Image (cartoon, rainbow, N blue to C red):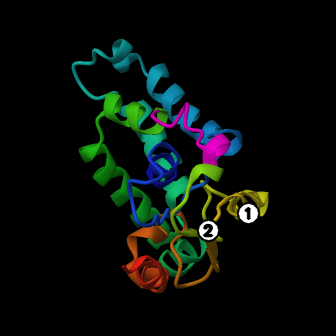
Amino acid sequence: MHSFLWGTLHPDFMDGLMPLACLPVPVVGRNRLWRQMIIDSIHADPAWQGGDYQEQPQAGLRAAAYLWAIAASAPTQLQINQATPAAVDKFKDELLQRELAAIDANDLIYQVDASRDYDPSAKLGLIKRPVQWVNSEDDFINPPFLGIAELEVKRLARGHFRLVPAGDHSYGHGSYNYAEIWQGDLAALLKETAR
């Protein structure tokens, strides 16, 4: 998301841009809805105390962890790696334990709410540098079936968009964590921006 912001705000500052797992439009629809559900779950927990909690609001954070797990996961990976009811239960319990140990309620609210006014769409035409943009077909947060990326990439003077097919080698929104998925795109960008 910052790639699109920097590209529109400082079009001469970089040689190229490589946005991953994002869209250059306002965070609305299901993307805003699941984020607001996380915030509401934390706010509804009596332990939150308006953000001045003495202990983490566990009930709110539990709901938040579950929502985040669905939004950031990939259906194929879940089906492969949690192939039995026992495996699913173990995964859920371990995920919850790990997340509750690491999450701070106010920090999480900030994370999911920070994009509330994100919208570089009006200035996409200002981006002068090459853009190598990669999203995943199984991304819950940026669903490709909306057709947004294919439409918006046309507004980039030197933009390229690739949609990683869903499957056993993609990881939903988290595909950006796996360099083997996008290393070819990065090589193409570096070649295009070589001086």
x then y, percent, for residue 10: 44, 47
**Extent of the magenta region:** 114-124
Residue drawn 64% across the image and 40% down it: 26
Q: Are marks 2 and 1 in contact (CB under 8 Å)?
A: yes
Q: Tell whether position 20 is magenta.
A: no
Q: Tell whether position 118 is magenta.
A: yes
Is 40 above or below relative to 145? above
Residue drawn 65% across the image and 64% down it: 157
Q: Secondary structure at mark 1?
A: helix
Circle nearer the N terminus (2, 1): 1
- Residue at the far front: name it: 195
Residue 154 - label: 1
Left or right of residue 45: residue 51: left
Number of numbered discs visible in the structure rendering: 2
Magenta span: chief secondary structure? loop
Q: Nearer the viewer, residue 135 or 110?
A: 135
Left or right of residue 94: residue 76: right
Q: Secondary structure at mark 2?
A: strand
Q: Nearer the viewer, residue 2 or 59?
A: 2
Is 8 above or below relative to 41? below
Identify the residue under disc 2: 159
Disc 2 residue type?
Answer: Gly
Mark 1 packing: few (<14 Cα in 10 Å), some, or many (20+)? some
Q: Quadrant of residue 51?
A: top left
Calculate the distance from the C-alpha at mark 2 to the C-alpha at mark 1: 7 Å
x then y, percent, for residue 85: 53, 70
Q: Nearer the viewer, residue 179 or 172?
A: 179
Is 191 above or below relative to 41? below
Disc 1 residue type?
Answer: Lys
